[in-house]
Amino acid sequence: MPRGNLFVMTGASGVGKGTIRGRLLEYHRMYYSISMTTRPPRVGERNGVDYYFVSKAEFESKIAQNGFLEWAQYVEDYYGTPREPVEEALSKGQDVILEIEVQGALQVKQAMPEAILVFIIPPSLSELRRRLLVRGTDSLAKIHKRLKRAEEEIRMADQFKYVLVNDQLDKAVSDFAAIIQAERLLQPRMSEALARALSVDPVLERELDELERKRLEAGEQGGQ
């Protein structure tokens, strides 16, 4: 069984990563690696479902134990991906999707060069500002920090394999799904299908031999 693909979704806060990820998981069988964070839960978020919400002391203890595939500090809060569940799912042939911050995505790229990095961008910085203001979960000071950070991160897009614009949600989800399917069909991952394509089924071959014999008896010339 081939090792699973590791898809790393990243982008600025407010760009819609969580919404795209949620829609993808409705239609694609993938292992979603839940990140750990020290930021407080937003309205509707559940511990162990959206994130593992922990204290800074707990997070820093796990860093010391090398328990993260990646981790980053983003606007005063820590975010990280626990290493063990990701490795286990990939070894079982499951595709894995991470939804993480840009610093963390680049760490994953260093640790696992085969990871497939997808950078989600807004249609414009003005639209991103509108989304952050409407979301209403951050102070104005924090929104200004996020916008400045977003501009810096978008300029790093050349380090990612794919760039996806989240302008219309349905199209963004469709575009991401196309990336998943294209990566699954790469030649190195199709070795089992190629082997099957060259295989011969003895039972079917006997049936086909009989079909050929009947056509020859009916007067058709063979070898033409």
Image (cartoon, grey):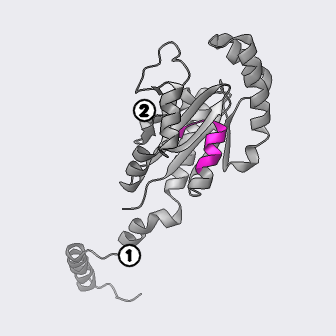
Nearer the observer, 65 or 171:
65
Q: Which mark is residue 71?
A: none
Q: At which x and y percent is residue 114?
A: 56, 57
Q: At which x and y percent is residue 164?
A: 67, 39
Q: Amino acid at mark 2?
A: Glu
Residue 1, picture quadrant: bottom left
Residue at 71%, 17% (x, y): give it.
Answer: 142
Q: Is residue 106 magenta?
A: yes
- Secondary structure at numbered mark 1: loop
Nearer the observer, 215 or 2:
2
User: Dominant secondary structure of the magenta stretch?
Assistant: helix
Q: Which mark is residue 26?
A: 2
Quadrant, the C terminus: bottom left
Nearer the observer, 141 or 176:
141
Q: Separation of disc 2 and disc 1 at Cα?
A: 35 Å
Residue 149, picture quadrant: top right
Upstream in sequence: badge 2 or badge 1: 2
Q: Dot 1 corresponds to which residue?
A: 198
Residue 111 relative to residue 138: left or right: left
User: Quick check: can you spot residue 124?
Assistant: no
Instruction: Say if mark 2 contacts mark 1, CB within 8 Å.
Output: no
Range of magenta residues = 98-108
Q: Nearer the viewer, mark 2 or mark 1?
A: 2
Q: At which x and y percent is residue 187?
A: 52, 65
